[in-house]
Image (cartoon, helix red, strand yellow):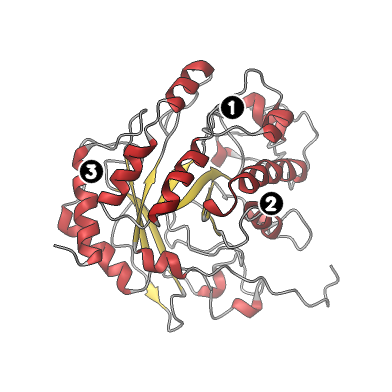
């Protein structure tokens, strides 16, 4: 792109439904806990049996009972085990038997949620399964630079496809994998939350593709109105990474995160000036005074992500914090533990119910 060529404006999706939803539930459905280093010894058939046994009707009933506005559900994470088949992934990675499940659990959940009005968003890593060495080598997420934030420091993996510094082929491969899922699910999936976008300056901040725009297009392949958010990780201030973020990823480990609300309706940034939210003051000049992303906070109700026997906050605090963010026209996503069969412990269901009653104004 010539330096003098005007940049075509990126049109964000309409996020009114997320604002109106007020709160949602996140579930990490994984073969391994999020803090496990490796799950290579886990049996593929055992994973398939577990996914096959997932009780979708019970999950949908629970979400209705707590008055959740949406569900954020993991497709997979570090291990390379996914709860949906993907022919593109299997072709590129070439591992048999595939760690992608036979059952398309995402499709089944989406179909069951459709009549209820509860929307489905999907969680994925932005970089593939970073603790599954064979898959990462095949995909090409083997940077020549220090990638210790991915737990893949130089020398950990073989650079089999000769990855360049931007990981161009890896990004194209992963866009194709995600586009297959998006195209299959179509308009029954309403959004994406992409984790581990921790090296945007090295991978995405470029005028030519691959970049955030090509990544967002892949995610929206099946639903152009789908919401997309790229997560830079837990940081204060939380920030919007790109013009393509329809809503703030908002990951935080602490409640009552300080925020500065902008005079523009539903557009805000946490602490830092908006013009710094995209990595440099001049990158998206038209967005300089208006970062343009829907206010959203993501945190957990238990001891940590995926864990906890009891909620860490009283019902009243969790409910009133949600109402506080709703008052800024934002939404809060609460993560809770889940069993292999898809059951959320009763104590967390009760707290979600308290939150739902508070934000919906029900007794």
Q: Are marks 2 and 3 in contact (CB under 8 Å)?
A: no
The residue carrying pointer 2 sits among few (fewer than 14), some (14 to 19) or many (20 or more) residues within 10 Å by Cα, namely some
Q: Position of residue 237 (x, y in %)?
A: 43, 63
Return the residue at label 1. Answer: 132
Q: Which mark is residue 348?
A: 3
**In the picture shown, does residue 313 fall above or below 263?**
above
Image quadrant holding the N terminus, namely bottom right
**Taking 34 as reference, is 241 left or right?**
right
Residue in the foreground of this view, choosing between 236 and 339: 339
- Depth check, mark 3 against mark 1: the one in front is 3
- Looking at marks 3 and 1 on the same chain, the residue that comes earlier in the sequence is marked by 1
Separation of residues labelled 3 and 1 (CA atoms): 32 Å
Separation of residues labelled 2 and 3 (CA atoms): 38 Å
At 69% from the left and 51% from the top, the residue drawn is: 203
Q: Residue furthest right?
A: 2
Residue in the foreground of this view, choosing between 191 and 242: 191
Quadrant of residue 346 within the rendered picture: top left
**In the picture shown, does residue 257 fall above or below 281?**
above
- Looking at marks 2 and 3 on the same chain, the residue that comes earlier in the sequence is marked by 2
Image quadrant holding the C terminus, namely bottom left
Q: Residue furthest bottom?
A: 263
**In the picture shown, does residue 319 fall above or below 193?**
below
Q: Secondary structure at mark 1?
A: loop
């Amino acid at each position: 792109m010539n330096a003098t060529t005007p940049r075509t404006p990126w049109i964000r999706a309409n996020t009114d439904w997320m604002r109106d939803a007020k709160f949602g539930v996140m579930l990490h459905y994984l073969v391994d806990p999020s803090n496990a280093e490796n799950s290579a010894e886990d049996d593929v058939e055992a994973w398939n049996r577990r996914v096959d046994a997932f009780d979708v009707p019970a999950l949908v009933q629970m979400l209705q009972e707590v008055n959740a506005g949406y569900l954020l559900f993991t497709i997979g994470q570090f291990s390379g085990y996914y709860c949906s088949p993907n022919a593109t992934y299997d072709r590129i990675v070439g591992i048999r038997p595939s760690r992608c499940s036979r059952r398309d659990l995402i499709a089944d959940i989406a179909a069951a949620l459709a009549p209820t009005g509860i929307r489905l968003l999907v969680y994925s890593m932005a970089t593939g399964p970073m603790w599954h060495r064979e898959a990462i080598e095949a995909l090409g997420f083997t940077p020549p630079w220090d990638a210790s934030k991915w737990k893949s420091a130089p020398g950990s993996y073989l650079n089999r496809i000769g990855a360049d510094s931007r990981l161009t082929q890896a990004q194209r491969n992963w866009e194709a994998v995600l586009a297959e899922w998006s195209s299959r699910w179509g308009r029954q999936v309403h959004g994406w939350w992409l984790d581990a976008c921790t090296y945007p300056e090295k991978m995405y901040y470029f005028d030519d593709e691959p970049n955030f725009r090509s990544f967002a297009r892949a995610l929206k392949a099946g639903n152009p109105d789908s919401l997309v958010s790229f997560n830079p990780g837990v940081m204060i201030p939380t920030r919007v990474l790109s013009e393509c973020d329809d809503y703030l990823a908002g990951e935080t480990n602490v409640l009552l995160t300080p925020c500065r609300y902008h005079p523009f309706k539903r557009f805000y940034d946490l602490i830092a000036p908006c013009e710094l939210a995209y990595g440099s003051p001049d990158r998206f000049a038209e967005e300089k005074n208006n970062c343009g992303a829907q206010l959203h906070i993501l945190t957990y109700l238990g001891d940590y992500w995926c864990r906890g026997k009891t909620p860490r906050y009283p019902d009243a605090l969790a409910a009133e914090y949600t109402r506080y963010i709703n008052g800024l026209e934002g939404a809060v996503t609460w993560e809770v533990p889940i069993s292999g069969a898809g059951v959320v412990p009763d104590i967390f269901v009760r707290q979600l119910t308290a939150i739902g009653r508070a934000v919906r104004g029900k007794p």
